[in-house]
Image (cartoon, helix red, strand yellow):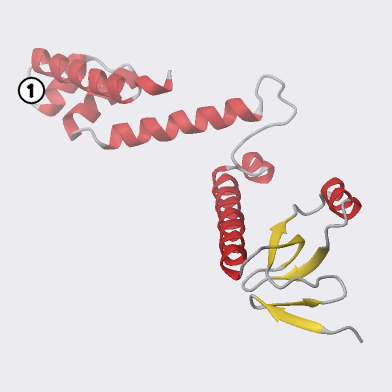
Amino acid sequence: MANLVKNNDVTTNTAALNYAHPYFVPIDDGDEVTLKYYKSQDVPVAHIALPGRMKHYYAVFNADTQEEADLMNRTYSAWMKKDMRDQKAKSDKEDSYEKMLEDGHNPADNSTNPEEILAYKVVINALNDALSDLTEEKLRACQMVAQGESQRKVAEELGISRRTLRGRKDDALSELGRKMKNYK
């Protein structure tokens, strides 16, 4: 049975590694080209689980000092953690195809594509946020414009003059225009 060495809280086979100060360079899952390259260069490759992580492939190198090995391991660990955070953030912002179907996407409709649907969703969400910031009177003025109601009827409903309503409508539409200028 091969000897096992415990270094940097990692247990690995000494037949594959005989390093005093190992550091571990992660290899992307499924990256056969990189695995073959390291092996062709006689760099040991280990399939191990570092503390707090799942089993993964690593190219193993030897540092001159333990401090250098620790620094390299911390650096690669930080990079892996950042990559995982970036992947999670990206997946959180993506809509699944199933969710798009639930939201009304019809794949048979060639006039729309997923990018257009997502862009439309972003604009609608921004518009809803902008509308929620308006006062009740300004929101009512926007509804009047959207529904094609007469200014006379809405002014009577609100108990204000048509000139005042027109001013508030213009203010509301200008405010919305400023908030939505980045979504044109």
Indicate the position of residue 68 as horizontal and vertical percent values.
59, 63
Q: Residue at x 75, y 27 (%)?
A: 108
Residue marked by disc 1: 160
- Please name the residue shown 56% across and 62% down the image: 71
> Is 154 on the left or on the right of 108, as rendered?
left
Q: Type of residue at label 1?
A: Ile
Determine the secondary structure under disc 1.
loop
Residue furthest bottom as drawn: 1
Q: Quick one: which residue is furthest to the front in this view?
A: 64
Residue 113 % position (x, y): 66, 26
Find residue 131 and report its image quarter. Answer: top left
Of the 4 image quadrants, the one containing the N terminus is: bottom right
In the visual, does 108 lie left or right of 71?
A: right
- The quarter in which the C terminus is drawn is top left
Give the left or right position of residue 107, taking residue 120 as reference.
Answer: right
Q: Nearer the viewer, residue 13 or 66?
A: 66
The answer to whether residue 94 is above or below residue 38 is above
Residue 88 position in % (x across, y down) = 58, 52
Q: Position of residue 95 (x, y in %)?
A: 60, 42
Query: At x 28% / y 21%, what residue is drawn?
Result: 178
Q: Relative to residue 49, is residue 30 depicted above or below? A: above
Q: Residues within 10 Å of mark 1 (few under 14, many from 20)?
A: few
Tell me: residue 115, above or below residue 165.
below
Between residues 7 and 140, which one lies in front from this camera angle?
A: 7
